[in-house]
């Protein structure tokens, strides 16, 4: 498997991009506060993602790695987990996570933290019996993704429930048909920002294999998508 080497510029661009995505103005916050107290049920991009996050409710301590606005953390907390750590390297993501945790009355259960890229290495082994990581591993360089996988395995408890969400696989042939350039045959850049590192289901399973066994693989779609091509891996630690 050919690796796509990470660059400092890629990582800086990614942080800037996602910081803009999750920025909330005062007007945005006021608008969100007009929503129903049950509107957290509508934050997951799909029903299957909602169920995946909900399945972590039985866990005693959950890590939502790359949480964004922490929709998965909110669902896990509302479903029974009393200790959810929601972390991201993006400041505006963490600020929006804290806002939603307060608004949906789970701030005592969802602890949102702004972290550095080496934060996982500081976490004691076996700290979490539930892990959620969606839309992270295939939007960072492969070497970074492999390091995250390794560290997630280390911080997972023996019988932890692990859920990994990934985007669709775009082959070189499919990209060519659509007039899309994949750098190195795998990397999709949009306006200079890395938006996808494309691996097949089988290639991801090989990356997981040294650390995890795949219990189940589901495919799902986001709103507006006709085909279920995104991936949801349910893993167990080896």
Image (cartoon, grey):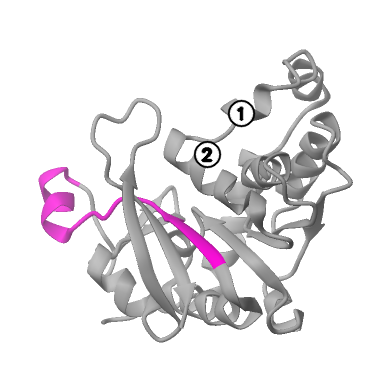
Q: Percent position (x, y) of residue 39?
A: 66, 22
Give the CA separation, mark 2 to mark 1: 8 Å
Q: Is residue 105 above or below residue 140?
A: above
Kindly identify the residue that appears in the image at 23 percent across and 35 percent down.
Answer: 227
Q: Which residue is mark 1?
A: 41
Label pair 2/1, CB-CB below 8 angstroms? yes
Q: Is residue 100 above or below residue 111?
A: above
In the orientation shown, which residue stands out farthest toward the top?
34
Find numbered disc 2 in the image and state the secondary structure of the residue it sits on: helix
Toward which corner of the image does residue 226 lie, by quadrant? top left
**Could you tell whether 184 is left or right of 216 in the image?**
left
Between 31 and 164, the one nearer to me in the picture: 164
Provide the residue span drawn in magenta. Answer: 161-179
Q: Percent position (x, y) of residue 105?
A: 85, 33
**Could you tell whether 117 is left or right of 238 in the image?**
right
Between 43 and 115, the one nearer to me in the picture: 43
Which circle marks residue 50 in the picture? 2
**Could you tell whether 161 is left or right of 63 in the image?**
left
Q: Is residue 76 above or below residue 186?
A: above
């Amino acid at each position: 498997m050919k690796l796509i080497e990470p660059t400092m510029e890629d990582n800086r661009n990614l942080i800037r991009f996602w910081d803009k995505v999750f920025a909330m103005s005062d007007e945005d916050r006021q608008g969100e506060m007009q929503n129903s107290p049950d509107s957290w049920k509508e934050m997951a991009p799909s029903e299957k993602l909602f169920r995946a996050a909900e399945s972590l409710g039985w866990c005693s301590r959950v890590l939502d790695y790359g949480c964004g606005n922490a929709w998965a953390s909110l669902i896990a907390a509302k479903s029974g987990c009393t200790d959810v750590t929601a972390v991201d390297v993006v400041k505006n993501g963490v600020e929006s996570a804290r806002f939603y945790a307060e608004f949906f009355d789970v701030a005592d259960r969802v602890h949102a933290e702004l972290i550095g890229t080496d934060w996982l290495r500081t976490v004691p082994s076996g700290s979490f019996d539930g892990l959620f990581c969606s839309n992270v591993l295939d939007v960072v360089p492969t070497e970074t993704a492999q390091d995250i996988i390794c560290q997630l395995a280390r911080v997972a408890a023996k019988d932890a429930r692990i859920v990994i969400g990934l985007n669709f696989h775009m082959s070189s042939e499919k990209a060519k048909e659509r007039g899309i350039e994949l750098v190195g045959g795998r990397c999709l850049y949009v306006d200079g920002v890395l938006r996808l590192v494309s691996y097949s289901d089988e290639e991801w399973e090989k990356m997981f294999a040294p650390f995890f066994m795949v219990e189940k693989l589901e495919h799902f779609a986001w709103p507006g998508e006709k085909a279920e091509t995104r991936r949801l891996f349910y893993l167990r630690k080896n």
